[in-house]
Image (cartoon, helix red, strand yellow):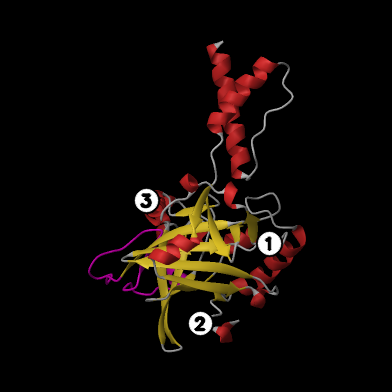
């Protein structure tokens, strides 16, 4: 009997987690008797975890936030990624609101009664979580107020980057989220040559970004340019996580451009369910521009790049 209960409990946990991840509620119905219903209801009451939220209003009151819109106009659609940079010391918290290509609603109106105070998390809480896993998608949702209305982001992606400025000659810096401004630039062709020297019989995994072993995950500075009197640092990001891929960074202004290759790769039924038509069309445009390393730029800073 104990074994049976344990198996049932594990099944319920797995089912509940799947439902939570898809932003659905966990309901238990159609059981043969009231005792069974009570048993499963009791389990589910302990399993269901309330959604966690981030208050944009609170963040704005405490921190200097650099907010940008990365326009998708160059990819054939008049939408944008909403991007929020919070840079403190060596930590850069990047909050990205991914556009909802299926319904066109990036923000969902909610009632104040739906948002319990204990379900809001602080900046420090997020940093601690991201120190363990530096990319969290749809685990915490940004909430903002417009007048008397309250809105929750449909899709929120969080990433933590470490900003350092150390010469490669002084110390070797490696890590899947470290932006080293003092690194010696290396382009993909150079990396390919080095990779093939070490792994002559293996596929160059950095071409598609999938299946990269954790010990090879890293960030590479590949160029530094003066644009609009700003020193812009360009980085390749090689890991198997979602979120922003290659990016451009400016001191004091944060991440001002980037690419989201995983977002364009998703199909209906994935974590971010986009409709077949726009995702397919965008994917075709993405593939066409991918060889050029085309990025989306903050239209507030670089209107000429739209």
Q: In which quarter of the image is residue 27?
A: top right
Image location (x, y in percent) of residue 291: 59, 73
Cα separation between marks 2 and 3: 31 Å
Residue located beneath label 1 in the image: 105
Q: What element carries label 2?
A: loop
Crowding around mark 3 (Cα neighbors within 10 Å: few <14, some 14 to 19, many 20+) is: few
Nearest the eye: 274 or 217: 274
Nearest the eye: 83 or 54: 54
Cα separation between marks 2 and 1: 25 Å
Q: Quadrant of residue 40?
A: top right
- Residue at the spot 64% in from the left edge and 73% down from the top edge: 72
Crowding around mark 2 (Cα neighbors within 10 Å: few <14, some 14 to 19, many 20+) is: some
> Residue placed farthest to the bottom in the image?
229
Q: For residue 189: magenta?
A: yes
Provide the residue span drawn in magenta. 165-194
Crowding around mark 1 (Cα neighbors within 10 Å: few <14, some 14 to 19, many 20+) is: few
Q: Can residue 204 be seen in this view?
A: no
Front position among marks 2 and 1: 1
Residue located beneath label 2 in the image: 301
Predominant SS along the magenta part: loop
Nearest the eye: 281 or 30: 30
Q: Quadrant of the C terminus?
A: bottom right
Q: For residue 193: magenta?
A: yes
Residue located beneath label 3 in the image: 128
């Amino acid at each position: 009997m104990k074994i049976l209960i344990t198996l049932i409990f594990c099944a319920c946990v797995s089912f509940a987690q799947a439902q939570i991840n898809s932003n659905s509620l966990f309901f238990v119905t159609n059981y043969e008797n009231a005792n069974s219903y009570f048993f499963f209801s009791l389990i589910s009451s302990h399993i269901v975890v309330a959604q966690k939220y981030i208050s944009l209003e609170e963040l704005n009151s405490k921190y200097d936030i650099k907010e940008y819109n990365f326009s998708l106009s160059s990819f054939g659609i008049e939408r944008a990624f909403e991007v929020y940079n919070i840079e403190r010391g060596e930590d850069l918290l990047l909050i990205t609101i991914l556009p909802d290509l299926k319904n066109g609603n990036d923000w969902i109106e909610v009632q104040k009664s739906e948002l319990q105070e204990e379900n809001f998390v602080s900046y420090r809480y997020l940093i601690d979580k991201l120190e363990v896993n530096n990319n969290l998608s749809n685990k915490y949702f940004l909430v903002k107020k417009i007048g008397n209305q309250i809105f929750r982001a449909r899709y929120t992606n969080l990433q933590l980057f470490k900003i350092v400025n150390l010469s490669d000659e002084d110390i070797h810096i490696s890590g899947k989220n470290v932006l080293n401004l003092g690194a010696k630039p290396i382009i993909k062709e150079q990396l390919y040559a080095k990779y093939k020297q070490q792994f002559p019989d293996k596929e160059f995994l950095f071409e598609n970004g999938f299946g990269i072993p954790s010990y090879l995950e890293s960030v590479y500075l590949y160029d530094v340019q003066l644009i609009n009197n700003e020193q812009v640092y360009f980085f390749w990001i090689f890991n198997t996580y979602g979120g922003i891929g290659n990016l451009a960074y400016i001191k004091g202004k944060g991440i001002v451009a980037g690419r989201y290759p995983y977002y364009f790769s998703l199909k209906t039924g994935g974590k971010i369910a986009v409709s077949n038509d726009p995702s397919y069309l965008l994917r075709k445009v993405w593939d066409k521009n991918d060889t050029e390393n085309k990025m989306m730029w903050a239209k507030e800073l670089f209107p000429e790049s739209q």
